[in-house]
């Protein structure tokens, strides 16, 4: 089990019996990623951030990225439908969690409950702005903001939607005072007629905040010279020999490559010999530890890999509701900063074989190093403050 005392962001909160290589360090301090804007000449009212549930943490992390870049004197609180909302406990911000809608619930009753919770949260926090990140602006959200004309309503929405989807959500655009679109590598791929202001890719960690390769490897306790692959495919059924993850692990089993799998719930001894598991949230600052990666093409993780200049194979999740991961992965492939493969064993295997080629990886690294990515979180924070001051 790998351990390190070199990461100031992490403390071991898990039992060693889990078999996880967990970075261990000082008390978590996500505010080390903060690059706050100057305080405004006149104080602004508090802001309430609300994230939808989604299938991961992307919505919540984008809102946190913006909050961390708002002025030090700006009061911010969170209300989230995400099951991982307790990550906000590691910040100075107040937070609350509400269960998301699930099939079997009465939808209208849930929407009324959401509206009531938001009204209470807005009142308790004395918020002057409600910033929502999600693809679908809930009716309960719109009900709550319609009740209070003094609250600036902001919709943060990724712009890369699958063709023909989302029209029913766009018709609610006029209900918001400001719409911000976290951008993509190719700014032309946006929601048509969405009425949004595009900003650069929004990530918790900016490209100048990642650790050096040497530092990141020290944190994870890795051999400084051994080639290391990040395998980040969600649950990662690495003991299922028919799975994508196990196919890729077996491919490099006879090489010097070490495979690192984040947050895999395997007990010690179950993972193949060439695999180490670790738990780290956030892990964006540790990305430079890896010589390559195979990952899904979700917004946050994809741009974290680009920020860290890690040559990667992207396996789009085609089962997402609106987010077009295939278009995002193809965009990276067209720019020469990533490879694209289907989320199926043989296609993923062919993609990894390309990535393992030293020449291919070196060319991709040159293209990645030439990228000039500006974190859109700062611009988004400024736009929100300007809207609140009107």
Image (tube, rainbow, N blue to C red):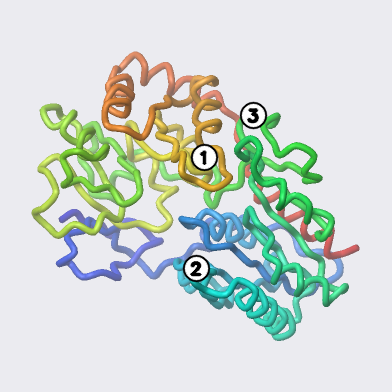
Quote the CA–CA distance across marks 1 and 2. 30 Å
Question: Quick one: quadrant of the C terminus?
Answer: bottom right
Q: Could you say which quadrant of the image residue 16 lies in?
A: bottom left
For this view, does 9 lie left or right of residue 152? left
Dot placed on the residue nearer the N-terminal end, 1 or 2: 2
Name the spot of residue 8 as percent of width and height, x first.
39, 61
For this view, does 37 lie left or right of residue 177? left
Question: Quick one: quadrant of the N terminus?
Answer: bottom left
**Residue depicted at x 20% and y 47%:** 276
Quote the CA–CA distance across marks 2 and 3. 35 Å
Contact (CB < 8 A) between labels 3 and 1?
A: no
**10 Å neighbourhood of mark 2: few (<14), some, or many (≥20)?**
few
Task: Please name the residue that numbered disc 2 is placed on.
Answer: 102
Dot placed on the residue nearer the N-terminal end, 3 or 1: 3
Task: Please name the residue that numbered disc 3 is placed on.
Answer: 186
Task: Please name the residue that numbered disc 1 is placed on.
Answer: 303
Name the spot of residue 304 as percent of width and height, x first.
48, 42
For this view, does 240 lie left or right of residue 58? left
- Helix, strand or loop for disc 2: loop
- Please identify the residue farthest to the top as the structure is shown: 359
**Residue depicted at x 27% and y 31%:** 345
Residue 153 drawn above or below residue 118? above
* Closer to viewer: mark 2 or mark 3: 2
């Amino acid at each position: 089990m790998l351990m390190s005392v070199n990461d100031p962001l992490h403390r071991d909160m898990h039992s060693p019996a889990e078999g996880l290589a967990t970075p261990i360090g000082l008390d978590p301090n996500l505010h080390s990623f903060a690059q706050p804007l100057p305080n405004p000449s006149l104080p602004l009212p508090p802001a309430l951030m609300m994230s939808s549930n989604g299938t991961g943490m992307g919505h919540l992390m984008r809102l946190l990225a913006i909050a961390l870049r708002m002025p030090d004197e700006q009061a911010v609180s969170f209300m989230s439908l995400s099951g991982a909302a307790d990550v906000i406990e590691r910040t100075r911000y107040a937070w609350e969690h509400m269960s998301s809608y699930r099939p079997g619930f009465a939808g209208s009753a849930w929407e009324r409950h959401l509206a009531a919770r938001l009204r209470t949260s807005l009142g308790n926090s004395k918020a002057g702005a409600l910033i929502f990140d999600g693809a679908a602006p809930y009716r309960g959200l719109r009900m709550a903001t319609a009740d209070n004309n003094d609250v600036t309503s902001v919709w943060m929405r990724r712009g890369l939607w699958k063709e023909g989807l989302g029209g029913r959500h766009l018709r609610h655009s006029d209900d918001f005072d400001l719409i911000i679109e976290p951008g993509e590598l190719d700014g032309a791929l946006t929601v048509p007629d969405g009425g949004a202001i595009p900003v650069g890719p929004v990530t918790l960690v900016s490209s100048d905040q990642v650790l050096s390769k040497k530092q990141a490897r020290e944190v994870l306790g890795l051999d400084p010279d051994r080639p290391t692959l990040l395998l980040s495919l969600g649950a990662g059924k690495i003991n299922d020999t028919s799975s994508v993850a196990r196919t890729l692990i077996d491919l490099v089993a006879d090489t010097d490559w070490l495979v690192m799998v984040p947050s895999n719930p395997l007990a010690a001894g179950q993972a193949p010999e060439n695999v180490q598991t670790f738990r780290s949230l956030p892990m964006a600052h540790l990305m430079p530890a890896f010589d390559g990666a195979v990952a899904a093409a979700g917004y946050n993780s994809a741009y974290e890999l680009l920020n860290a200049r890690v040559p990667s194979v992207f396996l789009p999740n085609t089962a997402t509701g609106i987010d077009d991961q295939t278009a995002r992965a193809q965009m990276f492939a067209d720019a020469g900063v990533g490879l694209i493969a289907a989320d199926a064993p043989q296609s993923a295997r062919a993609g990894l074989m390309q990535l393992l080629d030293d020449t291919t990886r070196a060319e991709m690294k040159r293209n990645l190093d030439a990228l000039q990515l500006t974190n859109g979180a700062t611009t988004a924070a400024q736009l929100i403050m300007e809207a609140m001051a009107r």
